[in-house]
Amino acid sequence: MRIVIAEDSVLLREGLTRVLAEFGHQVVEGLGDATRLLEVVEAHQPDLVIVDVRMPPTHTDEGLRAAVELRAARPATPVLVLSQYVEERYAAELLESGSVALGYLLKERVADVREFVDAAQRVAEGGTALDPEVVRQLLTRSKRRGPLEALTPREQEVLALMAQGLSNAALAEHLVVSAGAVEKHISNIFLKLELAPSETEHRRVVAVLRYLGGV
């Protein structure tokens, strides 16, 4: 896949470039700030954009704000945010930009190269990759009302794990239950959130974003 990286640390940017190249992916352009992100994405039409939250000139949230603006202008662009912390306001706003192809990972928790590359690939293919701490903080920030209150604690746990990008098989292994039990939990979640089968939306992703307050 073809990737654009916005990361002001030259060492980290080059490191990510080499790691991704080892797995057959190409970084078509690396940016040291976020000011030209939309322009570069429009020029290269990448399969994935990786953005650091803290970018020049203030090193606060320029990268994440640029990601939000990018998704507003190009909703279908897969975006993976890397951060040292959870910026709740813009993280929630980023989730509002659409129900597919989004990731938010904390740098300190990306200890495994294969895990990072797999997350990047999943986002590029239209899935989600949310760090467990991101999920926890966003859930704490906005306890949901309405149909979400009907979810059982186990269904809430399943939905939180779904937000991290776990497959049904991985969910079953993590929860130490059968695949059939996982499917039943997910079916109940879809039913309680009133998510009917759709040809245009991925119910699994929409359910996650509703839970996080994104839609």
Image (cartoon, rainbow, N blue to C red):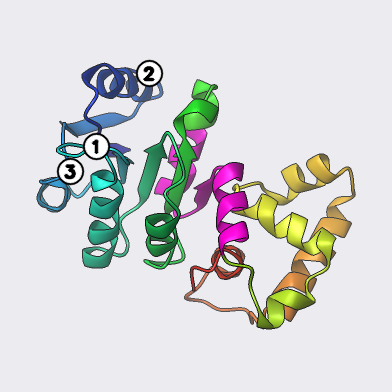
Which residue is at a point 52% across and 46% down the rendered structure image? 129
The image's mark for residue 76 is none
Report which quarter residue 55 is drawn in.
top left
Count of numbered tags: 3
The image's mark for residue 22 is 2
Type of residue at label 2? Answer: Glu
Q: Depth check: 56 or 118 in front?
A: 56
Do the residues bearing badges 3 and 1 touch, measured as CB atoms within 8 Å? no
Q: Which residue is mark 3?
A: 34
First in sequence: mark 2 vs mark 3: 2
Q: Is residue 110 left or right of residue 35?
A: right
From this view, report whether residue 159 is shown above or below residue 148. above
Q: Which residue is mark 1?
A: 59
Q: Which residues are magenta?
A: 117-141
Q: CA distance from mark 2 to mark 3?
A: 26 Å
Specify the principal SS of the magenta part.
helix
From this view, report whether residue 194 is shown above or below residue 129. below
Residue 2, image x, y percentages = 27, 38
Of marks 2 and 3, the one in the foreground = 3
Report which quarter residue 109 is drawn in.
top right
Q: Depth check: 106 or 30 in front?
A: 106
Counting other residues with Cα less than 10 Å from the Cα at mark 1, is it few (<14), some (14-19), or many (20 or more)?
few
From this view, report whether residue 94 is shown above or below residue 125. below
Which residue is at a point 74% across and 79% down the rendered structure image? 192
Of marks 2 and 1, the one in the foreground = 1
Type of residue at label 1? Answer: His
Res. 125 visible in picture: no
Of marks 3 and 1, the one in the foreground = 1
Do the residues bearing badges 2 and 1 touch, measured as CB atoms within 8 Å? no
Magenta stretch contains residue 15: no
SS at mark 2? helix
